[in-house]
Image: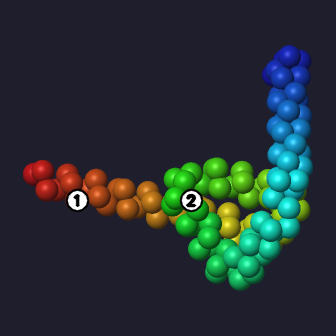
Amino acid sequence: MDFFGLLTMVGGLALFLYGMKTMGDALSKMAGGRLEQVLERMTDNPVKAVLLGAGVTAVIQSSSATTVMVVGFVNSGIMKLSQAVGVIMGANIGTTVTSWVLSLSIRQTAQSLR
């Protein structure tokens, strides 16, 4: 890796960190205490946090988007890290379940075409 590649990588990392900080600040200003209370109730139990993560991922069809939102919530202080772990695990489980359902439906369709 040459100097320009290293400089590009460091610049990209700095831009990413700045964006995360800006997003966290904006979330904390916009959401206020109400979103924090709602998320506290929905993630006070690890099982509920996993189910929330899986549900959100099923609705928006992207575990990456769910994870980015959760990281923004933790960064802004709306969620605690212990709550975020369950939601992110649920997001990954939701993606896996969605993939399995899709693969089983494709297999069923292929078998019915024979």
Identify which residue is drawn at 88% across, 53% down: 29
| Quadrant in which the N terminus is drawn | top right
Secondary element under disc 2, as helix, strand or loop, is helix
Most foreground residue, 40 or 111: 40
Mark 1 vs mark 2: which is more N-terminal?
A: 2
Which callout, 1 or 2, points to the residue nearer the camera? 2
Quadrant hosting residue 16: top right
- 62 on left or right of 85: left
Secondary element under disc 1, as helix, strand or loop, is helix
- 55 on left or right of 68: left
Q: Position of residue 48 (x, y in %)?
A: 64, 79
- 83 on left or right of 10: left
Is residue 95 visible in the rendered image? The answer is no
Q: Identify the residue under disc 2.
A: 57
Most foreground residue, 101 or 27: 27
Identify which residue is drawn at 86% across, 16% down: 4
Identify which residue is drawn at 87% across, 56% down: 28
Where 29 falls versus 6 (above or below)? below
Identify which residue is drawn at 52% across, 53% down: 61
Quadrant hosting residue 98: bottom left
Q: Are marks 1 and 2 in contact (CB under 8 Å)?
A: no
Amino acid carrying mark 2 in the image: Thr
Kindly report the distance in space between the C-alpha atoms of the residues bearing marks 1 and 2. 24 Å
Q: Position of residue 56 (x, y in %)?
A: 58, 62
Q: Position of residue 73 (x, y in %)?
A: 80, 58
In the image as oriented, which residue stretches furthest toward the left? Answer: 114
Is residue 41 visible in the rendered image? The answer is yes
Most foreground residue, 1 or 72: 72
- The numbered disc on residue 89 is none
Mark 1 neighbour density, 10 Å: few (under 14) some (14–19) many (20 or more) = few
Amino acid carrying mark 1 in the image: Gln
- The numbered disc on residue 108 is 1
